Structures are given as C-alpha cells and as structure tokens.
Image (cartoon, rainbow, N blue to C red):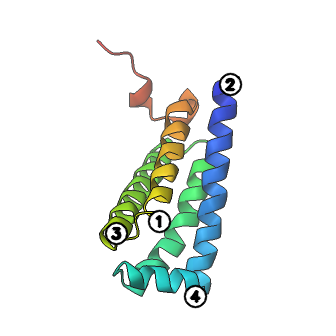
Amino acid sequence: MARKIAYWMTTGLLAAMSLFAAYAYLSGGSQAVEGFARVGYPQQLRILLGIAKPLGAIALLLPGIPRLKEWAYAGFTFAWIAACVAHYLANEKSEAVMPLVLLVLLAVSYLTRSPDRALASDNAPTR
C-alpha cells in the first residue's frame, strides 16, 4: 500500500508541475522567456517543451500504454538533466537544484510503479 501511495503522490506531483510549466512556457510568461534566454536556450525549445510536458504528464497518468510511459520517463529525465546542466553553466547554481529534485521524484515514481504500468520485459524473471 505504501508503494502505491508513493507512486501516486510522486506521479501526481510531477504531472501537476509539468502542466504548470507547460502553461508558463506556452503562454510566454516573462519568467519562462527570460529563464530560457539566461541559460542560452532558444525560445523554440520553450514551445517544444510546452507541448511535450503535458503529453508526458498524460502518458504517466493514463493506465496501460507502458511503452509510451517509458518514453515519457526518458523524456523528463533528459529534459531535467539538461536543465540542471544549463542552470549550473549559467552560474545559477541554486536554480540547478530544482531539476535534481524533480529527477528524484521521477525515480521514485518509476521505481514504485505497479507491474501493469511497466513494460513486459521489465516484469520478466531474470535467469
């Protein structure tokens, strides 16, 4: 039961934060626009992430579709590693912490997901 609670708490939190970020990215909020400019990212990436983040959040929340979930986990991982590195290289070390926190939440979500939300190869017994 604790595993299920950990999964839904982390997954729900990640999905909600991704939806809020997507709204900020797509609405052109000044904080998002300036943030991408400060780390040297093009504004086109802001739009692409604004589209990808809610799609990834939906993939994590919906039952079934295990392969799509794996892609969503991978996409969030790549995006947050890149965000951490970008903030660090832009001398925004305090800003680089949040993507790391999100990566920890993502790892908890991934490791506590139920077998029906994982790929069949993840459930196969090892020899």
User: Which quarter of the image is occupied by the C terminus?
Assistant: top left
User: Which percent across, then down, holds residue 116?
Assistant: 57, 31
Ranked by sequence position, the earlier of labels 4 and 3 is 4
Q: Say which residue label 3 marks.
A: 86
Separation of marks 4 and 2 at Cα, in angstroms: 40 Å
Numbered disc in front, either 1 or 3 = 1
Mark 3 neighbour class, 10 Å CA radius: few under 14, some 14 to 19, many 20 or more: many
Ranked by sequence position, the earlier of labels 3 and 2 is 2
Mark 4 neighbour class, 10 Å CA radius: few under 14, some 14 to 19, many 20 or more: few
Q: Which mark is residue 95?
A: 1
Q: Say what amino acid the circle numbered 4 marks.
A: Ser
Numbered disc in front, either 1 or 2 = 1
Q: Which mark is residue 2?
A: 2
Who's the residue at 68% across and 25% down the image?
2
Query: In the image, 12: left or right of 51?
Result: right
User: Which percent across, then down, holds residue 4?
Assistant: 67, 30
Q: Which mark is residue 30?
A: 4
Ranked by sequence position, the earlier of labels 4 and 1 is 4
Residue 28 seen in the figure = no
Q: Say what amino acid the circle numbered 1 marks.
A: Glu
Separation of marks 1 and 2 at Cα, in angstroms: 31 Å
Ranked by sequence position, the earlier of labels 1 and 3 is 3
Query: In the image, 39: left or right of 25?
Result: left
Q: Say what amino acid the circle numbered 2 marks.
A: Ala
Who's the residue at 62% across and 56% down the image?
15
Separation of marks 1 and 3 at Cα, in angstroms: 10 Å
Who's the residue at 63% across and 26% down the image?
3
Name the image quarter holding residue 87: bottom left
Q: Say what amino acid the circle numbered 3 marks.
A: Ala
Numbered disc in front, either 4 or 1 = 1
